[in-house]
Image (tube, rainbow, N blue to C red):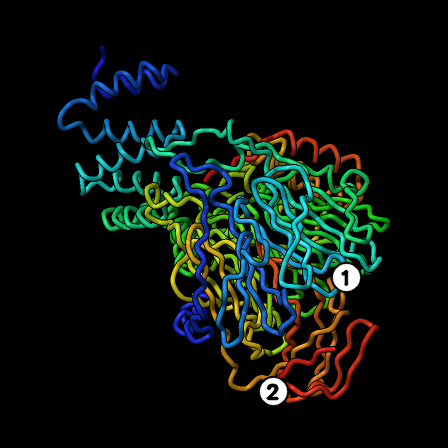
């Protein structure tokens, strides 16, 4: 039975998750288990959409290594995904104290403040998260917040930044289509959403795009296309979590 | 950004807006089981109405009736009124469906919905209305303008207790997600007069829509003189039934923008209401959703298209952490605009074992309307709230409210006077759903449409209280084109 972390990671790369998990469990049974093994176990459980199990491993990791920013960040990230924002905020704040300029930490801090309806704090954090994070996710998340506040032109600016970072970013086109729809610019909404459908992305975005196209084509009185997208939208089940 | 500062400031003043009211000798029996079965966390609703025409508003729950003896003294008259205690009741609605001048009661729940005819002598006679089911909201409204109140009867999901799924977390039962239960049609009944109702679900189009109905309100969204129906569903798309006339309805929720969130996701709609919150003459729609979904305030753009203004109005951030149920627009401070009250509570009484963020009992939120933007105040202790009914229990013109709680005792709050503003109460047979009331005070003309019910499984004092601002007289008041009066004095009820 392999029992080192490199082997576990190799098995994961080989798409052999069951064997990888068995190997990792051997490492987790060591007393005390290694921080890296606990973090990897947490990551795997998160990838499997098993937030409660991930929380157990990551809580253990953060307790074992209280000065590890990675442990606190991953725990905060896990709690955020599990919608338990109050403890998520505490973990992410700890991670920030340990590693001040970490882009992902700042991004999830902003998202967590938003989740807790502390919009003022989120509005302050997003620009810093965007500066420290080269990925397009941060400006897109900021754009979404601005959209909910109906600050549409500022949202457009953030989407432009997301697309500058990744010109093939489907979620950014999808979000821009939403902005156009809200503003009553239906032809522009259709153009962005149709383009987004040609790009790779998550199934949930695909559902959102069909929803948006159904509404936009209906406003443009293009009934056949509206019906087509409405049917496609209804074929993809929504993802509902409580 | 206007609202975060206002939010904080308003928290400090919330307690002065309402005072604790009388206690009622009633405790809701939710049938709580270890298994945590679906109907347990749904009820109850509450109704405020004057069943014995003594001028004092009484309070009904699905299995209890409290007579208001004046001076805020309430007596339990459930037995002598003939209310059945053996129902698993959820909703309670009042309306005079037979036009005999005595308000009747409709009780929904898990089982057979009962229509209680008010006999006018303090007693009610029950009649089964439909086959057993998980019946939730009932809305009386005149769908065809024939002067008789028709009835929408909402049904939650198809529910078979023998097939109740087991939803466990960490080995402990919790209530299952509504997705665990299949959607089910609701019903529309035409009032044929003389107490007879005809099921027109199929021909009207209402029966074709499969939902999980909680809240519903009848209002006229496109000002065509026909009452439409807005229906909130849990975990499936909301319905907006547009009344096409001749008792036919088209479901236009998706096209109008009220069916889903902006992402196209169904939300967990519970309580609803309609009101013209921004004073543009069109009825807007409100839905209380589940925590993290934000509540929706749909601004009516042109009669058929809506835009969710939860963000810019301040409603979204203020409601993000709560699960809302009963709610009602009303003019608390008599300044002529529509304020809002929302009661909340997480449906899972064991949520605190899973989350350090959420709580089972949640605050009551009062939203003060300031030209279409809202500032929020938290009122009193957190509650496992469900139904909410508004009414003037002590006839002082300041609207009081009753919160029905799940598995606990109801809570009554009394409205307090505004230091400067005046009011005018109206009681008139023409105050029926759909009617538009217009009034002038100090040269300012205001208007309000009467909607049917709103809230969650509840109904309200049928009298209307109009805000006059600082004026002590209404120059004129009119109800549609049917009735008009001039020079009505403020701070009293006028009955016609």
Rendered image: mark on residue B180: none
User: Which comes sooner in the sequence, label 2 or label 1?
Assistant: 1
- Between the residue at mark 2 and the residue at mark 1, the CA separation in whole angstroms equals 37 Å
Q: Position of residue A141 (x, y in %)?
A: 48, 47
Assess disc 1: are there few (<14), some (14-19) or many (≥20) residues with their C-alpha within 10 Å of its C-alpha: some
Q: How far from the left and from the top, in percent, is residue B301? A: 71, 59
Residue B390 versus residue B138 in the image, above or below: below
Give the residue pinned by disc 1: B99
Provide the secondary structure element on which disc 1 rests. loop
**Chain letter, disc 1 residue:** B
Residue located 61% across and 65% down the image: B49
Q: Nearer the viewer, residue B414 or B3?
A: B414
Check disc 2: other Cα within 10 Å, few if <14, some if 14-19, many if 20+: some
Q: Which residue is mark 2?
A: B470
The chain identifier of the residue carrying mark 2 reads B
Q: Position of residue B177 (x, y in %)?
A: 49, 37
Residue in the foreground of this view, choosing between B482 and B89: B89
A32 with respect to B291 (left or right)? left
> Residue at the location (29% across, 39% down)?
A75
């Amino acid at each position: 039975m392999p029992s080192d972390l490199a082997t576990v990671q190799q098995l994961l790369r080989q798409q052999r998750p069951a064997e990888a998990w068995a190997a990792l469990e051997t490492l987790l049974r060591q007393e005390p288990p290694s921080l890296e093994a606990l973090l990897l176990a947490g990551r795997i459980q998160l990838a499997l959409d098993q937030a409660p199990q991930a929380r157990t491993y990551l809580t253990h990791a953060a307790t074992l290594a209280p000065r590890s920013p990675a442990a606190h960040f991953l725990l905060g990230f896990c709690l955020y995904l599990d919608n338990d924002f109050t403890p998520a905020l505490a973990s992410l704040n700890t991670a920030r104290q340990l590693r001040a300029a970490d882009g992902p930490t700042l991004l999830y801090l902003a998202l967590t403040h938003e989740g807790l309806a502390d919009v003022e704090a989120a509005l302050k954090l997003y620009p810093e998260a965007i500066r420290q994070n080269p990925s397009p996710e941060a400006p897109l998340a900021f754009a979404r917040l601005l959209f909910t506040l109906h600050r549409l032109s500022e949202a457009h600016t953030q989407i432009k930044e997301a697309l500058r970072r990744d010109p093939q970013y489907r979620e950014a086109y999808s979000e821009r289509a939403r902005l156009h729809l809200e503003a009553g610019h239906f032809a522009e909404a259709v153009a962005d959403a149709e383009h987004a459908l040609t790009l790779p992305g998550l199934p949930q975005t695909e559902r959102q795009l069909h929803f948006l196209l159904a509404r936009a084509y209906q406003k443009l009185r293009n009934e056949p296309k509206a019906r087509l997208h409405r049917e496609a939208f209804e074929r993809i089940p929504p993802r509902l979590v409580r | 950004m206007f609202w975060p500062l206002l939010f904080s400031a308003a928290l400090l003043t919330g307690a002065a807006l309402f005072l604790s009211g009388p206690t009622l000798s009633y405790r809701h029996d939710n049938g709580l089981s270890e298994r945590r079965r679906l109907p347990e966390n749904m009820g109850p609703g509450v109704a405020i109405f004057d069943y014995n025409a003594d001028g004092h508003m009484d309070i009904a729950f699905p299995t209890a009736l409290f007579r208001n003896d004046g001076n805020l003294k309430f007596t339990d008259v459930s037995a002598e009124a003939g209310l059945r205690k053996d129902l698993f009741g959820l909703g309670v609605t009042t309306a005079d469906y037979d036009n005999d001048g005595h308000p009747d009661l409709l009780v929904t729940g898990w089982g057979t919905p009962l229509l209680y005819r008010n006999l006018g002598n303090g007693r009610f006679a029950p009649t089964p209305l439909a086959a057993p089911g998980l019946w939730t909201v009932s809305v009386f409204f005149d769908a065809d303008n024939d002067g008789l109140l028709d009835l929408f009867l909402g049904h939650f999901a198809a529910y078979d207790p023998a097939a109740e799924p087991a939803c466990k977390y960490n080995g402990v039962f919790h209530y299952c997600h509504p997705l665990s239960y299949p959607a089910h049609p609701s019903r529309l009944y035409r009032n044929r007069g003389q107490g007879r109702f005809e099921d027109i679900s199929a021909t009207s189009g209402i029966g074709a829509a499969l939902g999980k109905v909680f809240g519903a309100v009848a209002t006229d969204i496109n000002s065509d003189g026909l009452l439409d129906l807005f229906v909130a569903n849990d975990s499936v798309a909301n319905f907006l039934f547009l009344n096409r006339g001749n008792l036919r309805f088209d479901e236009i929720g998706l096209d109008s923008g009220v069916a889903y969130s902006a992402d196209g996701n169904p939300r967990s709609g519970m309580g609803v209401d309609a009101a013209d919150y921004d004073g543009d003459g069109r009825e807007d729609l409100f839905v209380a959703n589940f925590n993290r979904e934000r509540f929706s305030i749909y601004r009516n753009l042109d009669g058929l298209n809506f835009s969710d203004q939860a963000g810019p109005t301040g409603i979204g951030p203020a409601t993000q952490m709560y699960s809302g149920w009963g709610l009602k627009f009303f003019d608390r401070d008599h300044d002529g605009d529509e304020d809002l009250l929302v009661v909340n509570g997480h449906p899972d009484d064991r949520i605190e074992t899973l989350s350090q963020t959420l709580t089972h009992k949640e605050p009551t939120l009062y939203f003060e309307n300031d030209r279409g933007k809202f500032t929020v105040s938290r009122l009193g202790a957190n509650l496992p709230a469900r139904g909410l009914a508004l009414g003037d229990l002590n006839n002082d013109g300041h609207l009081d409210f009753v919160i029905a709680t799940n598995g606990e005792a109801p809570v009554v709050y009394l409205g307090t006077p505004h230091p400067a503003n005046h009011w005018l109460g109206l009681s008139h047979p023409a105050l029926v759903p759909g009617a538009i009331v217009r009034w002038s005070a100090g040269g300012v003309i205001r208007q309000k449409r009467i909607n049917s019910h709103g809230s969650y499984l509840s109904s309200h004092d049928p009298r209307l209280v109009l805000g006059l601002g600082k004026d002590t007289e209404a120059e004129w008041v009119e109800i549609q084109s049917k009735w008009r009066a001039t020079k009505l004095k403020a701070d009293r009820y006028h009955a016609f």
